[in-house]
Image: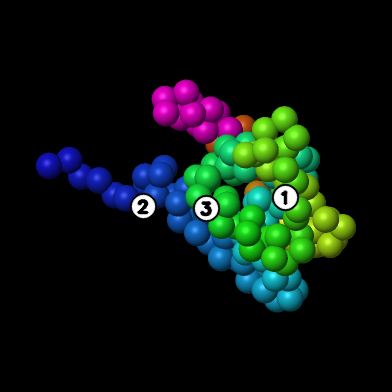
């Protein structure tokens, strides 16, 4: 049998890194008394960048299934961070927009995210960081075409 060390596997390294980054960012959110999860942060960010998007569009933007996005949006509506508006062209579709409170929370989350990214990349020089981003985007693009 071929010798295989999972610790040298790109998929494992990416998954492990994602786990540590998500855990660090979740703790940062909690430490700043923000009442959101990393999944909710992703949806808030997607709504900001796609104002009036449908739940289906948000699911695509966040790489989540529609059921999870619906559940997350239900929580964000209860918290007063987003509003569901009925689409006048198709009453079965809702467009999602941020509330003023949602924008304020998002501003704080963006600041925390920027700070976290600085910590994540603190041992990389600027060129290595840019190369890492370029490489990961290339791999992601290649895989997206295969799926």
Q: Nearer the viewer, residue 113 or 56?
A: 56
The N terminus: image quadrant: top left
- What is the count of numbered marks? 3
**Front of the two marks 3 and 1:** 1
Q: Residues within 10 Å of mark 2 (few under 14, many from 20)?
A: few
Could you tell me which residue is drawn at 75 percent across and 35 percent down?
Answer: 88
Residue that label 1 marks: 84
Please tell me whether residue 14 belongs to the stretch shown in magenta: no
| Image disc number at residue 109 | none
The boundaries of the magenta stretch are 137-147
Q: Earlier in the sequence, mark 1 or mark 2?
A: 2
Q: Nearer the viewer, residue 116 or 39?
A: 39
**How far apart are the two marked residues, 1 and 2, measured between alpha carbons?**
44 Å
Left or right: residue 135 versus residue 81 is left
**Front of the two marks 3 and 2:** 3
Residue lying farthest left?
1
């Amino acid at each position: 049998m071929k010798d295989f060390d999972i610790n040298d596997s790109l998929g494992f390294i990416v998954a492990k890194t994602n786990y540590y980054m998500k855990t660090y960012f979740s703790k940062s959110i909690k430490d700043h008394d923000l009442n959101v999860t990393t999944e909710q942060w992703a949806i808030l960010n997607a709504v900001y960048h796609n104002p009036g998007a449908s739940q289906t569009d948000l699911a695509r933007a966040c790489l989540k299934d529609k059921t999870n996005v619906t559940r997350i949006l239900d929580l964000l509506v209860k918290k007063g961070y987003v509003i569901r508006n009925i689409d006048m062209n198709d009453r079965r579709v809702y467009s999602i927009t941020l509330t003023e409170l949602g924008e304020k929370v998002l501003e704080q989350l963006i600041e925390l995210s920027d700070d976290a990214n600085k910590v994540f990349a603190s041992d990389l020089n600027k060129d290595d960081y840019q190369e890492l981003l370029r490489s990961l985007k290339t791999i992601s693009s290649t895989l997206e075409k295969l799926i």
